Image (tube, grey):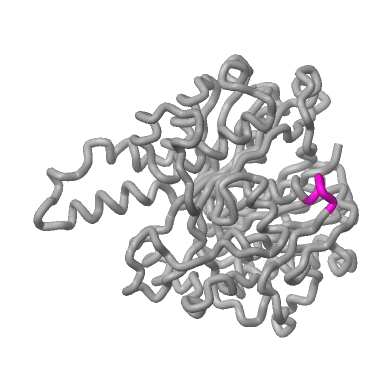
Amino acid sequence: MEKRRVVVTGLGCVSASGNNVKDTWNNVKNGVSGVDKITLFDASNHLVQIAAEVKDFNIENYDIDRKLARKTNRVTKFLLGASIEAVNDAGFDKDSIAKANAGIITGMGIGLSESADNAYQIYNDPAKGINRIPPLTAPLVLNNEPSANVAMHFQIHGPAWTLSTACASGTDALGLAADMIRLGRMDVCLAGGCDANITGFDIGCYQALSALTTKFNDNPKAASRPFDKDRSGFVMGEGAAVLILEEYEHAKARGARIYAEVAGFGASSDAYHLTAPCPDGAGGILAMKKALEDAGMKPEEINYYNAHGTSTSANDTAETAMLKSVFGDYAYKLHISSTKSETGHMVGGAGAIEAIMCVKALEENFIPPTANLDNPDLEHGCDLDYTPKTGVACEVKATASCSLGFGGHNGCIILKKI
């Protein structure tokens, strides 16, 4: 049976780089970092005092029930904002999306930290304790809460799923959504990812793991520096990104603008370590090869690769090894960049916003830069073209993006011009 084709017809995001796709892309393409001092809690006693926070976001600026908005988590507000932008961008409204054979698949990595952090503080406060825990805490700490609220807002009665594969969650959500559309179980899907983990407890946990950089508290904009020899850990980010995936004939029939085609998807598991990737990138290699096979494409047909590029030595060296294995000599001709250098690491939302960056690269024939890449880490083999500091205008016909998550989860999505 011939596979149904899947295309991208709408984009929406909320990030540290901007509260919509236009602002986020403009900042990313110009190498403007969204990292700054933490304001969401008092970080003065933390070794990590910087993060990529969403700024000046107000869900009440959107067409949304205010009662619903007040009862939702910070991350849910982000997902609602990104979803509303994406649905509008695709040319749907609440009535038409509700009538479509539609669903929602959201990737979430760490989870609903705000409500959990608040409940932990109350529970451990001798003056408050268990009897003062807010009554809605139980439903608010379920990871399905953002997807459920988006379904309620749009009155979408198809599947409203939440997928959690750590930092690969957003990419895997896109892949699962594409497969559901290919199978005919949906015609339209709001697919993407979200996370909001900038709380004292979460930052403290990742600080204890030595995963976050502690060396740039006085220079936040320079903190996220993938593939650079002076990198020292990733920068926690937050936000949401949503792509409207749609069956090709369905999109054509309603006269939708088509940004790109979802050409292929691949996923794998390292089965190696809870936090570290395989040093030779074996899991990522398998995911990328599966995506290329699914797309029926050769490696040299990819013009731009949006790297997972976390700004950690373990990731950057393993990912570079992965690219050299998959692309061979062509790896040195491939345009590569890590837009986490601008947005920070959005965890569950990372793969989704990076897919949006790939779509914009296709649309504008432009390779966004890796900010802060002053001195590539040649000692550890980081010698490819990572588009340091300044973006490049060139023809872009096909893009790939891999996400490599804790637990060894790997996802790869390939997007191409139609």
Instruction: Provide residue 143's location: percent of width, then percent of height.
Output: 42, 41
Q: Residue 385 falls in which quadrant of the image?
A: bottom right
Instruction: Provide residue 151's location: percent of width, then percent of height.
Output: 49, 26
The residue that appears at 32% across and 74% down in the rendered structure is: 45
Left or right: 383 in relation to 109: right
Instruction: Provide residue 93's location: percent of width, then percent of height.
Output: 61, 22
54 drawn magenta: no
Left or right: 249 in relation to 13: right
Instruction: Provide residue 101's location: percent of width, then percent of height.
Output: 63, 18
Residue farthest left in this picture: 127
- With respect to residue 61, does 378 lie above or below? below
The residue that appears at 85% across and 53% down in the rendered structure is: 302
- Nearer to us in this view, 332 or 299: 332
Left or right: 69 in relation to 389: left
Residue 281 visible to an observer of this rendering: no
The residue that appears at 25% across and 53% down in the rendered structure is: 120
**Can you say which quadrant of the picture contains the C terminus?**
top right
Which residues lie in the magenta part? Answer: 361-365
**Can you say which quadrant of the picture contains the N terminus?**
top right
The residue that appears at 75% across and 31% down in the rendered structure is: 6
- With respect to residue 97, does 174 lie above or below? below
Q: Main secondary structure of the magenta part?
A: helix
363 drawn magenta: yes
- With respect to residue 32, does 239 lie above or below? above
- Nearer to us in this view, 31 or 295: 31
